[in-house]
Image: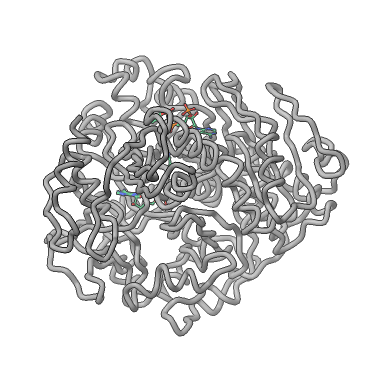
Amino acid sequence: MSYQAEYRRSMDNPEAFWKEKAADVSWIQPPTTIWQSTDNGHGQWFTDGIINTSDAALDANIRAGRGEQTALIYDSPVTGNQSAYTFNELTREVAEFAGALKDRGINKGDRVIIYMPMIPQAVVAMLACARLGAIHSVVFGGFAAHELAVRIDDASPKALITASCGIEVQKVIEYKPLVDKAIQEASHKPDFCVIYQRPQVTAALTEGRDIEWNALVEGATPASPVPLAATDPLYILYTSGTTGKPKGVVRDNGGHAVAMRYSMSLVYDAKPGDVFWAASDVGWVVGHSYIVYGPLLAGCTTVLYEGKPVKTPDAGAFWRVVQDHGVNLLFTAPTAFRAVRKEDPEADLMQQYDISTLKRLFLAGERLDPATYDWLREHTNLPVLDHWWQTETGWAICCNPVGLELMATKPGSATFPSPGYNVQVVDFKGSQMPAGEQGQIAVKLPLPPGCMTTVWGDDSRFVKTYLQPIPGFYTSGDGGFMDEDGYLFVMGRTDDVINVAGHRLSTGEMEEVVASHPAIAECCVVGIQDNLKGQVPVGLVLIKDGATIDHDELEEELVDMVREKIGSIACFRRALVVQRLPKTRSGKILRRVIRQIADGEPFNVPSTIDDPAILDELSDQFRS
Ligand code: COA
Ligand code: AMP
């Protein structure tokens, strides 16, 4: 079917469309009610369907005769290990671990936090929770103890699963002290913690609370998949918003499974048996959707890579993985290839490997800059497909629908709306912008299956953040335009969220940390352009009258504070002392103008500005 025909069907009769797509997933009881809306235009998919996502992703493949096919390949250049699990083996491990959790009192609806590096046990833990109907919340291993504490308090988990350490190139990061600190800081205390001991570090256990993974699993009776309502939550994944408090994006079981299965065909044209590699981390939505759930639901082999695009050991790492495992489809963030290109501009290292199995490259997570796109096209000669999505949606809002037909690409564009998404570029009243003109990118309600159902524990925040700003629409927080051919160009966030090396971070959260320094009177953090990471945060700080502190010393202290509170992934490395901040007459900081000045871009002096002379002062400071 052509893309246009499929898209039209999804718009004209969404219920028939999604009923048909739901048939590709293994249900315990297929749904008869496809969609039930609520007053605000939102609603629930597949309300009377019964499913278990662990069953649909694992056992269903065994039932389909794929038991001996490799389900998961673990490749870890940082430890020198490689291993593989068939669907039979992975299902066994997951069922055993689920049984062990169940013996410890974990049941449907309980929350479990998973704070783990990129090791197979992280995937096993996620799927084991799914098997029991327990709601997992994976916290990215690069977040500091405070961030973990915030998530513990919000999700109130019964258990926390971690490992003794993560490995960053050559740096061994002990997780247990971070977990202890987080639990100490949090008001909520998990009943117990499971620790997977890695050979590099043996974590000391806290008596009465901690138990080693192997000891927990010993003698456990494998658990069968628990039948769940399609609308029961599968997971919570926290993402940065504009305030200091991250939002717990909730995803259901049924809609998610259907969306994952469909997107594997539509967006990636993945077939059962294909080797699919999303070079990301299980702590991010890309990892949830396309390291764990999507590929397994589609009967693919997924690759779990504990390494970097460079330095593990060099910029040939990705090509080596492709060759070693016969990767067919590779998905990563543009920043990863910018790092590769920087170290291997002529792609000489690529020539050392046989990458002939690779059919397509997929990029998302941040804007795909034309230079990286061109470099990849030139050196791989493969289709390089940009797609745009968010933690909130769980799968591509816009893509090049290669599973239906490969559309001509336009560098800088994520191509067309995926079937199911009525994407429009509008103003805040919901009126459509003419082709080529920038506005808010919004999706007319209802959202398709797989998208967030609410914010954990705070549905009013969900409504206020996403549904109220433009009535009748889901507000994406991204701005951009559609050209006259209907191609969507995403130009960046319209809020205070920044994207650092494909990691979504809140400048508001960093501001809260910086403002807590005793010498700071006022501050603002903006994301400025960076050739490698896309954006990096920079702080502008005003020192309190009478505070005497050396500026370099202050910068160092602020950098340490952000590392300590948020984590090194924030890449907060610069704080500039300024005399004044540009503001409107009503006192609002002009962040956009600051960003434009920092990036050396032309800017309009806003008519509402309090004192235009500040802009010249700032320009001078950034130039120096
Ligand atoms: N656990 C602990 N610390 C982590 C971490 C993790 N999982 N991931 C990153 N960090 C730390 C790093 O050690 C580094 O710490 P440092 O400041 O003490 O050196 C800091 O966070 C920044 O790391 P990183 O963003 O990896 O920067 P880098 O300069 O070391 O590497 C890239 C640059 C481009 C190679 C790297 O950012 C990268 O691989 N990006 C791809 C990201 C990605 O796949 N995103 C996908 C989301 S879809
Ligand atoms: P996250 O929720 O961490 O996946 O981040 C989502 C945000 O990343 C989006 O709101 C966009 O700002 C940005 N983003 C993701 N994919 C793209 C893309 N293909 N092009 C431009 N921006 C993107």
Query: In this orientation, which residue lies closer to the viewer: 496 or 253?
Result: 496
Q: Residue furthest bottom?
A: 39
Q: Which quarter of the figure has residue 56? A: bottom right
Query: In this orientation, which residue lies closer to the viewer: 326 or 196?
Result: 196
Seen at 35% across and 41% down, the residue is 539
Q: How is the image coloured?
A: one colour
Seen at 38% across and 37% down, the residue is 501
Residue 415 in sight in this render: no
Q: Which quarter of the figure has residue 158? A: bottom right
| Left or right placement of residue 519 versus residue 7 in this view | right
Seen at 35% across and 48% down, the residue is 524
Q: Quadrant of the N terminus?
A: bottom left
Residue 484 in sight in this render: yes
| Left or right placement of residue 485 versus residue 155 in this view | left
Q: Is residue 378 above or below residue 537?
A: above
Report x, y in % for residue 479: 25, 58
Report x, y in % for residue 43: 48, 77
Report x, y in % for residue 624: 20, 29
| Left or right placement of residue 530 versus residue 92 in this view | left
Report x, y in % for residue 425: 23, 66
Query: In this orientation, which residue lies closer to the viewer: 476 or 207?
Result: 207
Query: In this orientation, which residue lies closer to the viewer: 285 or 82?
Result: 285
Q: Which quarter of the figure has residue 199? A: top right
Picture mark count = 0
